[in-house]
Amino acid sequence: SQQGEEDPQALSIQEGENATMNCSYKTSINNLQWYRQNSGRGLVHLILIRSNEREKHSGRLRVTLDTSKKSSSLLITASRAADTASYFCATRNTGANSKLTFGKGITLSVRP
Amino acid sequence: DVKVTQSSRYLVKRTGEKVFLECVQDMDHENMFWYRQDPGLGLRLIYFSYDVKMKEKGDIPEGYSVSREKKERFSLILESASTNQTSMYLCASSLSIQETQYFGPGTRLLVL
């Protein structure tokens, strides 16, 4: 069952530009996580934001969460060619044993 | 650093064969997960385990079984492989079921 839905599906930008990716979800969450996947590899965890947090930073990454709109955004500043990858949001619903539910992903291409 | 390893990066099997995919984590994590990833469908949870010998069905358990005899090892079994099980299989582990998941590199399985 799909919970998080990313937008856009694909994004192509020039090196040095900022990349903004969005995620919307339907039901109440405990936390929302962003992951990155390089082509043909496993996923790497980027950042976790809890439902009582509004913004988090990690290096060139900035994540915001708006629980009233049930949406999150991931901003990558000063993008590099090495940022080219697929990005997934994953939501953890409220509930003791709720699973992590992944969206379908956004393909980001950063042109050198 | 957490390390999650999977027994094979690429695997080619014939229809009807029994297939074992092995996953090992080295961080004493309680929880382990098996996902499959298909284009346009994102990651879908097959099975997960929150303790040795414990297992829970995910969203798409049909055609699969799992085994967790030791804490560090979680095996996915395809009892009789079919062509629609051709996919990328990803294993993950986490300390808490609520928190970050750490992924292995993935096994790309082709069933002929």
Image (spheres, rainbow, N blue to C red):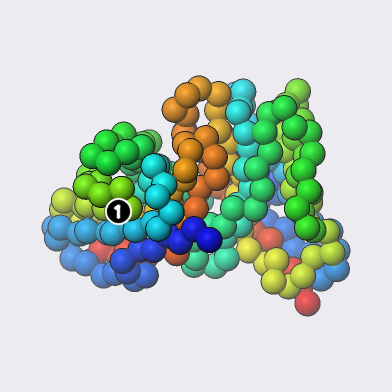
Q: Residue at x 32, y 38 (%)?
A: B51
Q: Quadrant of residue B26?
A: bottom left
Q: Position of residue A104 (x, y in %)?
A: 55, 47
Q: Residue at x 21, y 67 (%)?
A: B13
Quadrant including the C terminus of chain A:
bottom right
Whether residue A40 sits left or right of residue A4 in the image: it is: left
Q: Position of residue B29 (x, y in %)?
A: 41, 47
Q: Nearer the viewer, residue B20 or B79?
A: B20
Check disc 1 and report the residue beneath it. Answer: B73
Q: Nearer the viewer, residue B59 or B102?
A: B102
Q: Residues within 10 Å of mark 1 (few under 14, many from 20)?
A: some
Whether residue A63 sits left or right of residue B76 in the image: it is: right
Q: Quadrant of residue A109?
A: bottom right
Camera sees residue B39: no
Query: From this viewpoint, which residue is outermost toward the front?
Result: B28
Counting every numbered tag in the picture gives: 1
Whether residue A46 sits left or right of residue A76 in the image: it is: left
Q: Residue at x 18, y 65 (%)?
A: B14
Q: Position of residue B10 (x, y in %)?
A: 34, 71
Q: Position of residue B33 (x, y in %)?
A: 38, 46
Camera sees residue B91: yes
Q: Residue at x 57, y 57 (%)?
A: A44
Q: Chain of mark 1?
A: B
Helix, strand, or loop for circle 1? strand
Under mark 1, the amino acid is Arg
